[in-house]
Amino acid sequence: MNKKSAFTLTEVLITMGVIGIISALTVPTLVSNYQRKALTVQLRKVVNDMSNAADMLMTEEGKAKFSATTGYNNLDNFVTNHFKILKTCDSNSTTGCFANEKYRSITGTVADATFSCGGNSYVLADSAAICLAKDDDGNVVVTTDTNGQEGPNIAGRDLFIFTLSAADGTPGFSGSSGDCTSNATGTGCYELLAGENNWTMNY
């Protein structure tokens, strides 16, 4: 008579318990890493699209400088003529474009107020929200929430600030470096991510 061996119910339950504990420890980390990579890819896309649009505009108008183009002098036309727009929010309110709540820093500091844009803000076809303005040097400052109103609405995760050079439209830093992890405005985060960390969100 052949004797068949099998796992007992106790052994199966213990094995399932061990698998459950391992999953509980590793899955959140995997999900967090995936989200960071996805947000980084989205930021790179926004930066590249903005820079390419500036370059295309200079080519179309035969200008050697971005600051000499019509789009530079009218940023609303620059956006509407070179991007597919899903939604436009006027200067009175960014509701529907950027987060309705106050942005937070990575360390938990909450912004003094909800985000406001000096002019119109937009939601692009890839769901990124953008706001354009000019700094004292004439560069175009782009504030973007890479996934619009969706969370996490944290500076350095989905909220960033970068510039387009007035000279040639190339992307650069916002000019004022800051501690990315402790401020809720996104200042210094693009510089840290694209400059120092080689597009790795390990902060």
Image (spheres, helix red, strand yellow):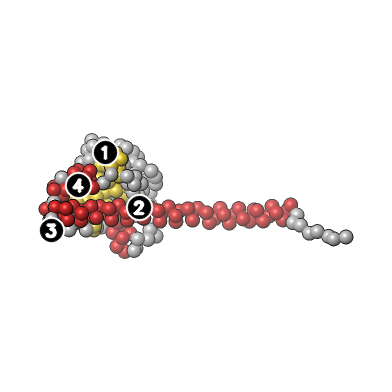
Q: How crowded is mark 2: few (under 14 residues within 10 Å), some or many (20 or more)?
A: some
* Relative image position of residue 70 (x, y in whole percent): 13, 48
Residue under label 4: 78
Q: Residues within 10 Å of mark 3 (few under 14, many from 20)?
A: few
How far apart are the alpha carbons under marks 1 and 4? 14 Å
Circle on res. 58: none
Residue under label 1: 88
Of badges 2 and 3, the one in the foreground is: 3
Nearer to the camera, 83 or 164: 83
* Relative image position of residue 105 (x, y in whole percent): 35, 50
Q: Which of marks 1 and 3 is nearer the N terminus?
A: 3
Q: Is mark 4 on a helix, strand or loop?
A: helix
Question: Contact, CB < 8 Å: mark 1 with mark 2?
Answer: no
Nearer to the camera, 42 or 115: 42
Residue lying at 26% horizontally and 38% vertically, measured from the top left: 88
In this rendering, the count of numbered labels is: 4
Q: How crowded is mark 4: few (under 14 residues within 10 Å), some or many (20 or more)?
A: some
Quadrant holding the C terminus: bottom left
* Relative image position of residue 108 (x, y in whole percent): 38, 49
Residue under label 3: 64
Q: Earlier in the sequence, mark 1 or mark 2?
A: 2
Residue 113 located left or right of residue 32: left
